[in-house]
């Protein structure tokens, strides 16, 4: 093969590789954008449906996490499940406790730690919120075939584990 033909083939191959990389990058960007906007729209819609209850997103999120846990949670575990810093959770719990929706109790294994539980009023409200959230979840996911939903869940859980692993490996990460 002549030198000119080799250069032409090399150019074609490099253009094809670049094209594949650009397309892959474009797919990654589409995926991340779709995921970000889905989460934003999902929470915004729930916010709108929960507005009559006068709850901020942070407050309803705490109530639903406690309900789904079906048992009291250590304050640090609740903060992790909600995805906020423990100091931020303290302020939320102060407000929810003042409203009679949650109760702090001493942890029997560690008297310095607190366990958080829903009061009867908090449980009743959380059940009502959960019912609204379940209806919305059905509206969003009900038309997706079960096999496609199961595959999507597997992909998202895999990405969640990978993201957690990357986060743990970050230099300077607080342990």
Image (cartoon, helix red, strand yellow):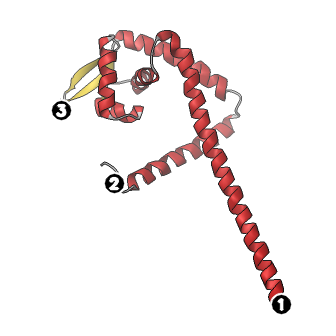
Which callout, 1 or 2, points at the residue further toward the start of the chain? 1
Which sits in the foreground, 67 or 51? 51
- Cβ–Cβ under 8 Å for marks 1 and 3: no
Residue 129 x %, y %: 50, 16
For the point 57% across and 31% down, which residue is it? Answer: 40
Q: Which residue is mark 2?
A: 172
131 lies left or right of 83: right
Tell me which corner region of the image, top left, top right, bottom left or bottom right, holds residue 65: top left
Q: Which mark is residue 2?
A: 1
44 lies left or right of 12: left
Q: Which residue is mark 3?
A: 110
Which callout, 1 or 3, points at the residue further toward the start of the chain? 1
For the point 69% across and 59% down, which residue is it? Answer: 22
Which callout, 2 or 3, points at the residue further toward the start of the chain? 3
Sort mark 3 into few (<14), some (14-19) or many (20+) by Cα contacts within 10 Å: few
131 lies left or right of 114: right
User: Is 114 rendered above or below residue 173?
Assistant: above
Sort mark 2 into few (<14), some (14-19) or many (20+) by Cα contacts within 10 Å: few
């Amino acid at each position: 093969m002549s030198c000119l033909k080799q250069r032409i083939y090399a150019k074609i191959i490099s253009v094809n590789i670049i094209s594949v990389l650009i397309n892959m990058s474009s797919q990654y960007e589409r995926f991340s954008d779709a995921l970000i906007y889905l989460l934003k729209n999902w929470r915004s819609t729930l916010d709108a449906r929960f507005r009559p209850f006068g709850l901020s997103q942070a407050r309803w999120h705490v109530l639903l996490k406690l309900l789904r846990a079906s048992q009291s949670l250590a304050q640090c575990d609740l903060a992790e499940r909600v995805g906020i810093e423990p100091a931020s959770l303290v302020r939320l719990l102060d407000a929810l406790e003042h409203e009679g929706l949650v109760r702090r109790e001493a942890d029997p294994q560690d008297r310095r730690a607190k366990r958080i539980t829903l009061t009867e009023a908090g449980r009743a409200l959380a059940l009502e919120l959960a019912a609204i959230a379940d209806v919305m979840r059905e509206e969003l996911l009900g038309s997706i075939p079960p096999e496609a939903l199961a595959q999507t869940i597997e992909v998202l859980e895999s990405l969640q584990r990978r993201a957690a692993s990357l986060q743990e490996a970050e230099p300077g990460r607080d342990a």
